[in-house]
Amino acid sequence: MPPKDKETVSGQGCKPPVTVYLGLGSNMGDSRANLQRAVALLDLHPEIKVERVSPFLETAPVGYLEQPHFLNGVLQATTTLSPQALLAAAQSIENRLGRKRTVRWGPRTIDIDILLYGDLVLKSADLTIPHPRMQERAFVLQPLALLAPELRLPGCLETVGALAQKLAHPAAEK
Ligand code: ADP
Ligand code: MG
């Protein structure tokens, strides 16, 4: 057999990993344990490697106010999954940790959102990246700013650190 072209061999099945940021939230049960389990399960996925995790911050609910406070965090990971496959992996972990979808923005054992996927901008029926409301949400920007203050959202001049500082109600670290 003739030797294989080098590029074909090294290119087979090897996608370059993309840096992603995921938002985590919980306000049911043992929230800290739920966030830690979500981090561990994400890292167990063969195509997700968790690199860094922010401190967890206690935050007041947004949207639907009659519910307990949240514990929120953000993680940085690298992945070879497509955005859709990453969403599916996140949702399967939400289900595994007992997430029931009842009230929109209501209480949940765990919420895992894709905040950023490299510098991709995507709008499809079930997936919007960057996460549509992240710029105005202190519970996303504050932990993200602790992890990556110099990061910029695609097409945004201000850093995540500067955006976080502009938000009125600072969350207390727990
Ligand atoms: P929320 O996170 O806004 O409180 P849910 O977790 O119930 O709400 O998600 C509702 C839907 O949001 C999901 O079914 C998913 O298809 C969609 N969605 C759109 N963009 C994203 C994203 N970047 N990350 C996670 N879910 C997203
Ligand atoms: Mg969500």
Image: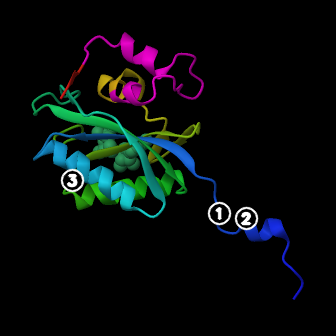
The stretch drawn in magenta includes residue 161? yes
Q: CA distance from mark 2 to mark 3?
A: 38 Å
Residue at 41%, 62% (x, y): give it: 45
Residue that numbered label 2 is attached to: 11
Residue contact at pointers 1 and 2, CB within 8 angstroms: yes
Image position of 167 (left or right of 14): left
The answer to whether one can see residue 108 in this image is no
Task: Write the residue at 40% across / 41% down.
Answer: 52
Mark 1 → mark 2, Cα distance in angstroms = 6 Å
Regarding mark 2 in the picture, which secondary structure is present there? helix
Counting from the top left corner in percent of width and height, residue 144 is at 39, 29
Quarter that holds the N terminus: bottom right
The circle on residue 14 is 1
**Residue 28: in sight, yes or no?**
yes
Looking at the image, is mark 3 or mark 1 nearer the viewer? 1
Disc 3 marks which amino acid?
Answer: Arg
Magenta span covers which residues?
Answer: 143-170
Left or right of 104 on screen, residue 47: right
Q: CA distance from mark 3 to mark 1?
A: 33 Å
| Callout 1 amino acid | Cys
The tag on residue 99 is 3
Up/down of 76 relative to 47, above or below: above
Give neighbour class at mark 2: few <14, some 14-19, many 20+ (Cα, 10 Å).
few
For residue 159, side relative to residue 63 (left or right)? right
Q: Residue at x 45, y 53 (%)?
A: 49
Measured as percent of width and height from the top left, residue 99 is found at: 21, 53
**Element under disc 1:** loop
